[in-house]
Image (spheres, helix red, strand yellow):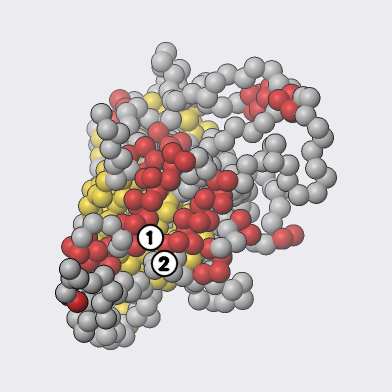
Amino acid sequence: MAGSSEDALLQPPDDEQYPTLDRHPSHYNPLHTFELAKDDQKHYKQQYSDMYFLRLAKLKPTVQAIAAEAWESIQIAGEAVQHKDRVLDVRQGELCFVVGTVYMDMPLKPNILDDISKDHWISAPPPREKYLSPTGEDQVMLEDESGRLRLTGAYLQAMMLVTGCIVAVMGTENANGDFEVIDLKVPDFPRQPERWERDDSAVIFTNGHGSSQRKRKKEPNENRLSGGKIAIVSGLGISGEEADSLSLDMLMEFLLGEACGEAEQREASNISRLIIAGNSLAEVDPLHKDDLVGKKAGKKYGYDSSTYNPSPIAHLDTFLSTLLPSIPITLIPGDSDPANVSLPQQPIHPAMLPHSRAYAALPTSTEPGWFDAVTNPWEGDIDGWRFMGNGGQPINDVFKYVEGDERLDMMENLLRWRCGAPTAPDTLWCYPFQDKDQLIIEECPHVYFVGNQPRFESTTVEGHTGQNVRLIAVPKFKETGELVLLDADTLEVEIIRFQVFDGH
């Protein structure tokens, strides 16, 4: 018996209307703070010592003003605090303060002889998790253009200090020639721009203490929509193996709104931008020439498949090009990505991503593209908020200098030191700047994120003149399966976790 027409598989289309979800727009205005000169304008013949002088010359007036205001009324045993211009002007028994650059003299820090031994294939010592000496041999120095002064005192035990930060110390020189520290001041947070300041052409000038001198502001754009959410992920660790695909596919389907039900699709549509904060590719070990013994000679042109595996970068390109038609992406390189090793890392070359680069801006364009490959570190404005972030190298290097593993404390101190990578160039590779240290933080961000951290952490910190910063330690996605979502209105954060059920 033939079924009714209602049970037939082939039916004409009905008139029912299904809702269409549109992705929340992203207001994106990047800065180009960390871009280096091109071609023959970039060279490495300069001395790195100039960086420390530039950093000290830039931050010394700020620290000196903060210290003078804090200590001008202090007297100890009837003696007022004096200011010394140079560390070598300090005299024994005089209560004074001086400004300089911290240098951590640590025997376990990397040594240039280690690099020489590697060149000659002598067995080099394994990399250390910490530079701290278990026997207490570490020393804290304060130096400027005149010389170096050794710092001592119980006060230093409670302070987080690393090589390269600019500080003012108050105390007196003892009989051993060491400077006994009583108090210490840092530059603290710089001025923080208002939300939408760049977009609304606001002009606000403030002095070092935050007092307003002149303010002129246009009326804000009344058509501006409320903020959506910004997704931040790091440590994708794509190796090109099949084991990567499942968790990445789950992340991709969530961002595209293809996973779960209507509620999750609406949540995904509120995500206005994806930021990938370094280490998109997994770390690889280069092949030594001895490993290639017995193999035929490499090709003169092109690449040799026996020594080069294009699968990881091809998988990353596929991942990005699948997302890009739906969501704009900011790509920050990391230490395992195909970019220069020294900070600031320049953007991953578009030739590495042939499918994704179709969504990037033209080289002659002044407007950012839908796909924006940027530097590491990077800063810019998203939905009016000033963002600053990096792939994790500065914090991971600071971790080696200090006790404990409080990543948020390290992030806060970097902002208070006003330096995005204070340990560069001592133990962190960087470009030898000559005219300006681009790693100095000129303006305080509203959101400071650091990728490739051991675990997710977040908090807010306040500055001495009302600055408020959201700190976010972004974990490695490959190890945790965690995606960070930041609300663009409230700057509150939440975690989306993707987990593969193993059946046990």
How packed is label 2: few (under 14 Cα within 10 Å), some, or many (20 or more)?
Answer: many
Residue at the image point whose x is 43% and y is 45% from the top: 245
> How many numbered marks, from 0 up?
2
Q: In the figure, 442 relative to 196: above or below?
A: above
Q: Is residue 418 visible?
A: no
Query: Could you tell me residue 191's position as x and y percent?
Result: 34, 62
Residue at the image point whose x is 38% and y is 60% from the top: 274
Q: Nearer the viewer, residue 15 or 85?
A: 15
Q: Nearer the viewer, residue 488 or 271?
A: 271
Where does label 1 land, which residue? 274
| Quadrant (top left/top right/bottom left/bottom right) for the C terminus | top left
Query: Could you tell me residue 6's position as x and y percent?
Result: 17, 75
Q: Are marks 2 and 1 in contact (CB under 8 Å)?
A: yes
At mark 2, the secondary structure is: loop
Q: Nearer the viewer, residue 483 or 355?
A: 355
Q: Which disc, if any, is residue 328?
A: 2
Query: Could you tell me residue 226's position as x and y percent?
Result: 23, 74
Distance of mark 2 from mark 1, alpha carbons?
Answer: 6 Å
Classify residue 293 as left or right of residue 281.
right
Classify residue 356 as left or right of residue 79.
right
Q: Which disc, if any, is residue 266?
A: none
At mark 1, the secondary structure is: strand
Which mark sits nearer the N-terminus, 2 or 1? 1
Rendering quarter of residue 121: top right
